[in-house]
Amino acid sequence: MILEVAILDVIPGKENDFQIDFAKAQLIISSMKGYLNHELKRCIENPSRYILMVNWETLEDHTEGFRGSSAYQEWKQLLHHYYDPFPVVEHYESLSRGLETTEGFGNQTPTIT
């Protein structure tokens, strides 16, 4: 599984319109091959900033499948005019899956997989 992460800086004053259009756009991305789930969060300290996290089965499902599709053109039309600056999108892979508890109270060993 690959995690796509994008920090979205929305033009101040356009937040409500962005959220309305994102509600439409999420239907597009969620229909794509390899899409697993997504989460959009709004920053408390900076209400014009959002973080989008999308889980994909593979990197190529996002970079080639989604971005190379006609659906991506719809996504762009709905959302890209809200961003200033344009977001950097990065991809992450898991190195650990939490903590395993060994014998003894509070004795935890990180597990790297």
Image (cartoon, helix red, strand yellow):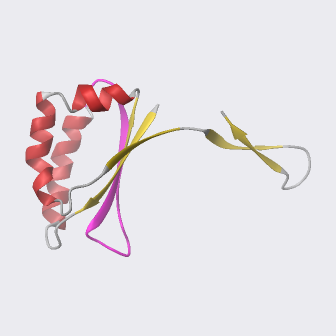
Q: Is 18 drawn above or below residue 11 in the view shown?
A: above
- Quadrant location, the C terminus: top right
Question: Which residue is rendered at x = 91% and y = 44% of the image?
Answer: 103
Figure check: 53 above or below 30: below
Tell which residue pokes out farthest to the right in this image: 104
Whether residue 33 sits left or right of residue 107 in the image: it is left
The residue stretch that appears in magenta: 31-52
Q: How many marks?
A: 0
User: Which x, y percent locates residue 64?
Assistant: 25, 27
- Quadrant of res 30: top left
- Name the residue nearer the viewer: 21 or 9: 9
Q: Is residue 19 magenta?
A: no
Compared with residue 36, is residue 92 higher up or lower down, i.e. above or below?
below
Q: Position of residue 104 (x, y in %)?
A: 91, 50
Place residue 15 in its image quadrant. Answer: bottom left
* Image position, residue 73 (x, y; %): 10, 37
Q: Residue at x 16, y 35 (%)?
A: 72
Q: Is residue 90 above or below residue 31?
A: below
Q: Residue at x 26, y 54 (%)?
A: 87
Instruction: Give the x, y percent position of residue 85.
Output: 21, 62
Q: What residue is at 16 percent from the left and 45 percent from the top? A: 24
Q: Does the magenta portion include 34? A: yes
